[in-house]
Image (cartoon, helix red, strand yellow):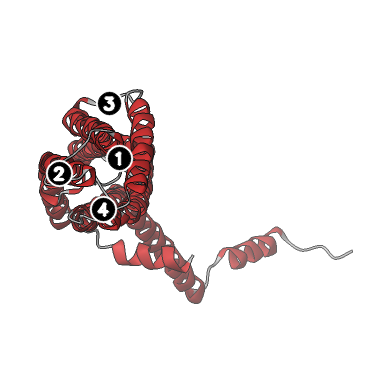
Amino acid sequence: MAVYPYKYYLQLLEKGSKISFVQKILLTFFGVLFIFAGTASAILFYQYQKYLPIQAQNQYLQLAHGGFTSVSQSLEELLTAFKVAGAKVEVIDKSKESSASAAGFFVSLDDIQKTLSKLQSTKEDIKFQKNLLEEKTTPEVYSGLNNDLLNFYQKSEELIDGISADYQFTKELLLVLGPDFYLPVLSNESLWHSGKEQEIASYYQKTKESADGTLEKLQKLSVPDNFRTYFDVQMKYFELVINVSNNIINTLESKEKINADSATQIEKAYQIMVGASRENEAISQKLLEERLKLFDLKVNLEKFSSLNLAQNSLQTKFDDSFQSQPQSKMDQFFRGFTNVH
């Protein structure tokens, strides 16, 4: 076994403890790189923490404004639907022919049903947007805007509910009136030209019986206060129809002897109808005015006036919020990163 002196071991230890120049350079480089990476990570984390509130604010604004725009468009579409339906009502109601009553009935019923469906879909949209907003955490800076928006949705729902109730009652009233009594017509003119007493008497007998049945159904309806005038005028029309029908039937069935120079029973009955037509014309005009209140664009604009003020105010607040919203320098980076993933 070889034996080495103690001095030899010291020399070996001294050689092993020395670090080369290249090794020092490498150690320095990795040290600096580590410090730089740590500093960059800290800066990136700091910027990210600053970015989070701005990102949350931007997300809130996009969500809130998108819902607001959707509801506003639905409300505008409602006003357009009112305008179109109102124009149809005015055209149909100006007709003096009994045959137009049935056509007007089905057109109006279809328009009312479409409007009710539109009202329902608008209400569902409002409810959805409101719930979506309530589930979203609101940045403190936009708490006032959020409250105003929720208040706008609440008022919109209340308005839609009120209009829906009006249309629902109109539909019920329309179904009670039916095709025969949609328009306030007193007679079928072609029937009088035939000069057949029995046919005329039979026509008014059926009309009277139908009017009696319809009047009974009308009296069972629960009438909203804002429809009271409309309903009263409608009732007045049926009273006129029944009264005229009775008078014409009694005149045609009268056994009274008439002179050669006197008017015939048909002529007397026709005069009764002509006299009643003047009163019916006034009733017809009043009914048209009341019907148009439901569809009239000016009337509905008045209903929406308070909402329009709130809409304009909210749109201004959204515009100001988008313009004043600070943009982080990291927005583009994180937006691109999010899109990639």
Q: Residues within 10 Å of mark 4 (few under 14, many from 20)?
A: some
| Quarter the N terminus occupies | bottom right
Establish if 169 lies above or below 36: above
Callout 2 secondary element: helix
Q: Earlier in the sequence, mark 1 or mark 4?
A: 1
Q: Which residue is mark 4?
A: 192
Q: Nearer the viewer, residue 277 or 48?
A: 277
| Residue occupying image coordinates x 19% and y 37% | 148
Q: Using residue 120 as the reference point, say whether residue 324 is left or right of it.
A: left
> Can see residue 337?
yes
Mark 2–mark 4 CB contact (< 8 Å): no
Q: Which residue is mark 1?
A: 167
Spatial distance from mark 2 to mark 4, Cα to Cα? Answer: 11 Å
Mark 1–mark 4 CB contact (< 8 Å): no
User: Of the residues tagged 3 and 4, which is closer to the observer?
Assistant: 4
Q: Which residue is mark 2?
A: 271
Callout 3 secondary element: loop
Residue type at mark 1: give it: Tyr
Q: Which residue is mark 3?
A: 223
Residue type at mark 3: give it: Val
Q: Using residue 99 as the reference point, say whether residue 23 is left or right of it.
A: right
Q: Position of residue 306 (x, y in %)?
A: 12, 39
Q: Earlier in the sequence, mark 2 or mark 4?
A: 4
Callout 4 secondary element: helix
| Residue occupying image coordinates x 69% and y 61% | 9
Q: Nearer the viewer, residue 298 or 204?
A: 204
Q: Nearer the viewer, residue 277 or 164?
A: 277
Q: Earlier in the sequence, mark 3 or mark 4?
A: 4
User: Of the residues tagged 3 and 2, which is closer to the observer?
Assistant: 2
Name the image quarter holding residue 231: top left
